[in-house]
Image (cartoon, rainbow, N blue to C red):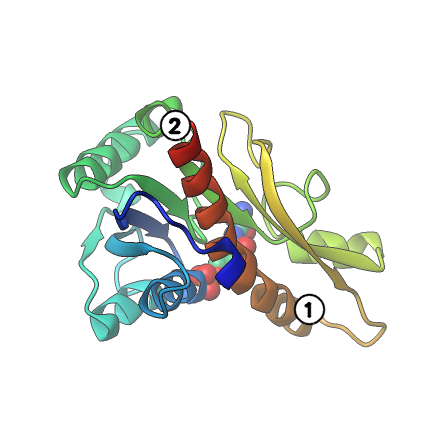
Amino acid sequence: MESSRLVAAGKRLRLGVMASGAGSNFEALVAACQADALAANVVQLVVNNPGCGAAQRAQRLGIPCQLIDHRLQPSREALDAALVDCLQEQGVDLVVMAGWMRIVTPVLIAAFPSRLLNIHPSLLPSFKGLDGVGQALAAGVTLTGCTAHLVNEAVDSGEILIQAAVPVRVDDDHARLRARIQQQEHQILPAAVALLAQRLVDQG
Ligand code: GAR
């Protein structure tokens, strides 16, 4: 991780994270920031599911967490507009979708051009969409993995930043394979944030 340490003209990046579930990737980002492997701070978590694991981790870690429940929003665009308001209010530089299980719209994508990342549990372009782990098992592949990529308007189709390969073992079930993929996600997601941040610095 040291090699991907971000030196951004002395400025620590302000990260926003969006999560729907357990939040292990969110916590990996916070840990990378705290260990100074990433010259950034997670300044805001947004969750859409009340009481989800990510929200509980935020409380334990002392990271501000905002609930924006998609069930209370009239449309995907309204949900994304509320996300943009919250993240912009906190002056966020980059946004990471760390297990965000909603399809996003141009409202969010246009607010953070080339600054919106996603982590997906497959070697894209294979197994886009829901349950990338289950899709890989059903297809019988012997190699799968995870991908950190930019978000564009087509699901799981933006520019790939970093991937990690994970062999599928003959005795794998969904939980075992998912756990090994997630170990890799926790490595490549902070590295992808550093890569993207450095690119933004280089571009001026
Ligand atoms: C991660 O494995 C991530 O790849 C996946 O959700 C999990 C969230 O875990 N995301 C997707 O499937 C998006 N299509 P976490 O809440 O423990 O970080």
Q: Residue at x 39, y 58 (%)?
A: 38
Q: Is residue 93 left or right of residue 185?
A: left
* Along the viewing direction, whichever of 178 and 149 lies nearer the viewer: 149
**Element under label 2?**
helix
The residue that label 2 is drawn on is 109
The reply to whether discs 1 and 2 touch (Cβ–Cβ < 8 Å) is no
Using the image, determine if residue 89 lies above or below residue 170. Answer: above
**Element under label 1?**
helix
Residue 197, located in which quarter of the rendered image? top left
Using the image, determine if residue 163 lies above or below residue 203. Answer: below
- In the picture as drawn, the residue positioned furthest to the left comes out as 89
- Front: mark 1 or 2: 2
Q: Give how far across and how far down residue 17 sits, in percent.
A: 33, 50
The residue that label 1 is drawn on is 177
| Count of labels in the image | 2
Q: Residue at x 30, y 70 (%)?
A: 57
Q: Give how far across and how far down residue 109 sits, in percent.
A: 38, 27
